[in-house]
Amino acid sequence: MSTELVTMNIGPIHPSTHGVFRMRVTFDGETIIDAEPIIGYLHRGSEKLAEERTYTQVVTLTDRMDYTASMTNNQAYILSVEKLSGITPSERGVWLRMIAAELQRIAAHSVAIGFLINDLGAWHTPLLYLLREREKILELFEMMCGARITNSYLRPGGVFMDAPDEFWPSLNKFLDEMPNRLDDIENLLTDNEIILARTQNVATLKKDDAINASVTGPMLRASGVDWDLRHRNPYDYYEKISFRRPLGTVGDNNDRYLVRLHEIRESLKIVEQCLDLIEPGPVKPEEVPFLVRPPEGESYVPIEAPKGELGFYLVSDGGIAPFRCHVRAPSLINLTLLRDMVIGYKIADLFVTFGSIDVNMGEVDR
Amino acid sequence: MTKVLLGSEIEDILRSNFKNQIEAAGEDYVQISNDKSLDLFNYLKIDQKYDLLSSVTSVDRISHFEVVYHLTSLQKNESLVIKIKCGEGRIDPKVKSVVSVWRGAELQEREIYDLMGIMFEDHPNMKRLLLWENFEGHPLRKDFVS
């Protein structure tokens, strides 16, 4: 039996839209028959602002794009600047930013999983377990650079200061404890019957569709495509590191959850390997000036951010500010298929699917 | 490591079938003409296995506009850059939409239209993405004054 169609606005102010996302959804009863994402509520014109700032000042803008993953945003931007201006970073600086980036990945995936479970209706308890672990990472960041969220830790050539002595025991303590905390979370969630019933075979995404729609990151790997830029295009010192790449088989919401959970464990291993390989030394080459002035040209260095392929396309006209700074934002591009994924499912599956895509509105709108 | 193709290598791939469409080759990109660009992109996607459209973006070059495509081949682990020049003299910039080849261009092309004012012909839903419908002008253009 079909009923009268109802079109409803969900968001932009809604607890399950992870910020200011709005969807115009048409329902037949409880079944979704159309969904259109409407975005732009957090648009701050970062790309335009970057054209009026020096290369070093733009680092602060990148923090505010995906604000759950500032360190990886910094990393993508700095790698592009280094390629553009031919700067060779100092070794210790690179190890420090890899440690920071992997810790950031753990923090970002914790947020993603926590809010996904929250969207499923498991109010707050699992979320707070995960946010508690994220809090420890934010405290580590505070030791490293004085900031918790908007870090601005990286500079062309490395990082702006070395981590203090008390950072290392705290980091080791975190690495020792985190696997046990993950076991707790897995015991609580992974085999939970309600979660399985709600996520398995919901919003399945096929391999070819995912590639064709430029979907990247954990979402692509959940569909079974072995594409991780840390492995396929090792930037920084990732080629000296070994890690597994968890893959999904079905590409449903449950796979997207599992891939992220397993990636947290791999990130812990990567940080441990970095700790074995890091050596004392300068964190930034002396000769890199504060005011970087790259020659004319352009660069694009994609990295594996927690959400997917993140890259800054920089065009230089030889001046002190970028002529053009474009952000390849994985959050925005992963949304391309949202409509196709939710059509035919119930209203309750809409938020679970949206949560499993894991977008950050700061990055969608920039 | 992903191999980033040089301009001359991209030319070699395209020379056999699309010789007339190559307008210029830079150090690490090839500039092609807008006519029949979809044939060329389909050839790159299907025959040359460049299955992932990493990013589409645009640059305001003052005298004209440029649309820049970053393509990646997951199988071959290679990437290349294609550029299309449009809107000579800043008048009426438009290029063909590649949504029919790669779905991933859908939101990115809308963003370019919104912020840079380049029209994409045959795009299924060509309207502003981030700004509201009545907004005047395109902020990423160099002559935009807020």
Image (spheres, rainbow, N blue to C red):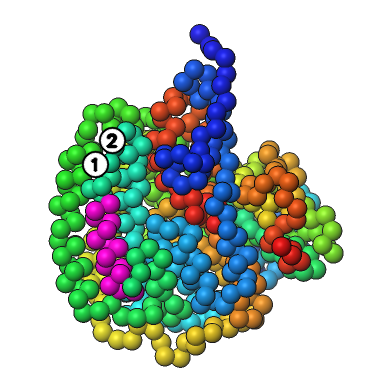
> Whole-percent x and y of residue A139?
27, 65
Q: Main secondary structure of the magenta part?
A: helix
Q: Quadrant of residue A94?
A: bottom left
Distance from label 2 to label 1 (Cα)?
7 Å
Q: Residue at x 52, y 41 (%)?
A: A12
Residue indicated by mark 1 = A125
Is B30 on the left or on the right of A22, as rendered? right
Q: Say which quadrant the C terminus of chain A sits in.
A: bottom right
- Secondary structure beneath dot 1 equals helix
Is A266 on the left or on the right of A283, as rendered? left
Report if the CB atoms under discs 2 and 1 are less than 8 Å apart: yes
Q: Residue at x 30, y 86 (%)?
A: A281
Q: Residue at x 57, y 77 (%)?
A: A54
> Whole-percent x and y of residue A22?
53, 40
Q: Amino acid at mark 2?
A: Ala
Within-10-Å neighbours for mark 2: few <14, some 14–19, many 20+: some
Q: Please report, as a chain letter, where disc 1 is located.
A: A
Within-10-Å neighbours for mark 1: few <14, some 14–19, many 20+: few
> Whole-percent x and y of residue A128?
26, 47
Is A215 on the left or on the right of A234, as rendered? right
Numbered disc total: 2
Residue indicated by mark 2 = A122
Q: Quadrant of residue A316?
A: bottom right
Query: In front here: A56 or A197?
Result: A56
**Magenta part of the protein: which range?**
A131-145
Q: Amino acid at mark 1?
A: Thr
> Whole-percent x and y of residue A31?
48, 21
The question of residue B120 being in magenta is answered with no
- Which residue ends up furthest to the front in the rendered image? A13
- Labels 2, 1: one chain: yes
